[in-house]
Image (tube, rainbow, N blue to C red):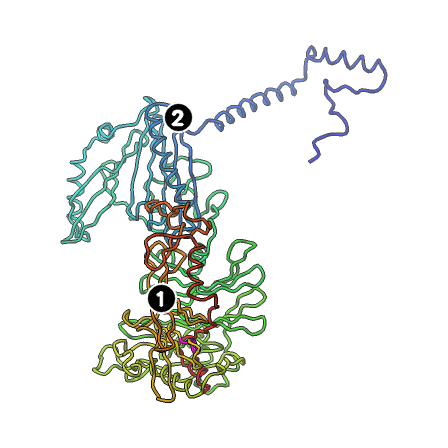
Amino acid sequence: MNRTSPTPPRSPFATHLSGSARETELRIRNIFQWKKKRPPLWLMALVGAVILLCGSLVSCQSQAKQASPVELQLQYYDQLGNYVEVPALAVPETEDARALNEELSALATEYRTAIDQISYGQQGDWFRCLCYPTQTDRYLSLVLYRYDQGTAAGLAGFSPTLSTWVYDRKEGRLVTEDEAWSLAGTSLEALRAQLAEETTAAPTDNQVLEEVSLAGFRIGEENQVTVYLSSVHTSGEDVEFDRLYQWQGGTLERCPSPSITPQVEEYLVPAEETMELSPALWCRWNADGGEPEGGWDPVPMSESVQNHQLARRTIESYEYLYGTSEYRLFSHAQGSRTLMLVESTGAPHAAGLDNLVLGVWDEDAQDFTGESYLIGGDNGLWSTWEEGEVLWLLCSNSTTYQGDETCSGLGLFRFADSTLERVLELPQAALDSSILPDTEEARYLLHPQGDSETGSLSYTFWSGRLAIPGEGGFDLYEKNPSYNPYHPTSTPTSQWLYRGFVPLSDQKAAVLSGGDPQARSYYASLLENVLIGQPLPDALYDFSADRPVSPSRYIENRFGVYDVDGDGREELLLSLYTTIVAGQGTYVLDYQADTDTLLLQSPDRFGLEPIFYENGTVLSPWSHNQGWGGRFWPYTVYQYEPGSDSYSYAGSADAWDRKISDQNPDFPAFPEELDVSNSGFLYYLDGDDTPVDESVYLQWLEGHTGGTSPLPVQWFALTEQNIARLSGR
């Protein structure tokens, strides 16, 4: 808007600065004589109305500017489920007001620290501090309800904590418990008796009241006191803590237990009774089904936060699940967008023990874009392959109840031009194969299972089949009619029978080139036996204790073929993940054609997927990283001995990650003075308890590897398809 006018407004105070002196004189005289003239009646009425209106506006402005006696010193809401509201009294300073504000300030500091640690915590953990402030002409009541899931933020676990304060503005002090009981006209003993009587009379409550304590109170209009009680109940050996009740006007009601997503019925104070603050409190905007004023607070972005956000936006029931964990399985960038595949584990069995979720992250928008997808179940499997600029992702899952495994779906996804889409039409390569039956159900096997017509057809197809993803397609299994998990026999029977590989692409997975055909054929036969639970030759390892094992579990195992010792023969490297702990690890197996024997070169076994070097050194990762290594995984060093055609122990390395100390205040401080290289790590070599700088560690490592490079061993999932690629069948 143009706030300047080309001509001044006409009024007794507006003087035209041009024209004759006579005109100027008349205007000046009019200025001084204007108040002496009797204005018209209509003008007097108008002026009176304006005066009254101005008075009303002044009154309204005075009310609007009246300071609230309660302010929020910390207000935070994010989409990970963290809500924090910490108030402060804005009243004339008294000893009690100052002490209360100091207590609340310390609480705000605690939650600020928790907020700063969000990106380092276990996603799925969250914390809440919800405030319900109310006021009357005399009393200010603060009700603070805190509860947390997990301890990554350094807070106090899930047990809810109720804190209340009532401030008497007339006397400038906090109201005592005795005064509250007096106003309420009752006592703790009387309420204990009432609660015991009502609990005993409740037809669905088999718990016995053991303890009752005062959790807090507030004072409302007409000095009506609301009392909050915390109680402990038992039933046999079971103990139920932290029941919360509220009493008002003779009536006792149990407060609902807090949920991950708080509902209106869980409010400890009706929203309409709380003070209207700006920005609005959670109890106000949530009651209206809205969002925080000004939007959600940004979360410090990290891989774990992204994983959590993807699971939260994809899994419909996610917010009702406790203790889930997310792990990034795969990512692939195209421009500013990245396809992410995330594993979500730890949910109740009915919600899927091992769900796969996938979506696209937009770096520019700092958010996920487009549709995200869920392949739910207990054992998520996946594979990828590329065709030109297109990335293909194949996901499957299965559920198992009492030993009976059922495929819960197969999803084929195409990621091109930074866009993810689910492919529902079965590719021609699959239709042309002789593996699939020529049925309507088979043509809809890529559709999500569900209540729709196509979903029902997909469900029918997979009800007796299993898919193991591979490069460019999947291994298809059918249920063994002899398998009955409810009536096991003395001889274990496999649930699944292999039917063949179903291609989903014209691009076939390449046969593994090179190598001795006789040795490779031997290794392929050995791996086939491993798939069905047969022991390794010469009693190297007996898998019979692991049977029957589904092929959907064996895909987690890995194998590779490479001449790791430099003797001119390829060794079979077999990393077993899914066997019992006593058998987990990597076996280095050497087939010697002249004697038709299999030699175990590794000392029993190495760690899973070890690193082999050109000079015969092996870095064998430990099974656990329970020390202070953090981002560094400890390992043992082995050296190949040509004389014995085996490996011997040569050393070990562990570390101290500075981030472990930074994120855990109970840990010793990281000794910065020893970290001369400023790497953030100190190292423990060969079992010595004295930490050394990274420069010492690198010199030690070079002494073992001789400055050589790691061998490019390629690891493959233990599947029928990959075994066929090894043998060339």
Main secondary structure type of the part rendered in magenta: strand
> Left or right of 336: which side holds 534?
left
Upstream in sequence: badge 1 or badge 2? 2
Q: Nearer the viewer, residue 41 or 173?
A: 173
Q: Residues within 10 Å of mark 1 (few under 14, many from 20)?
A: some
Q: Position of residue 10 (x, y in %)?
A: 74, 23
> Left or right of 702: which side holds 576?
left
Q: Residue at x 48, y 76 (%)?
A: 471
Q: Which residue is mark 1?
A: 650
The residue most toward the right is 20
In the image, residue 406 sits, relative to residue 115, either above or below, namely below
Q: Position of residue 114 (x, y in %)?
A: 39, 44
Instruction: Nearest to the eye among marks 1 and 2: give it.
Output: 1
Tell me the SS state at disc 2.
loop
Magenta range: 559-564
In the image, residue 50 sits, relative to residue 26, either above or below, namely below
Q: Residue at x 46, y 56 (%)?
A: 303
Label placed on residue 91: 2
Q: Is residue 441 visible?
A: no
- Decide whether residue 411 is among the magenta residues: no
Q: Residue at x 17, y 45 (%)?
A: 198
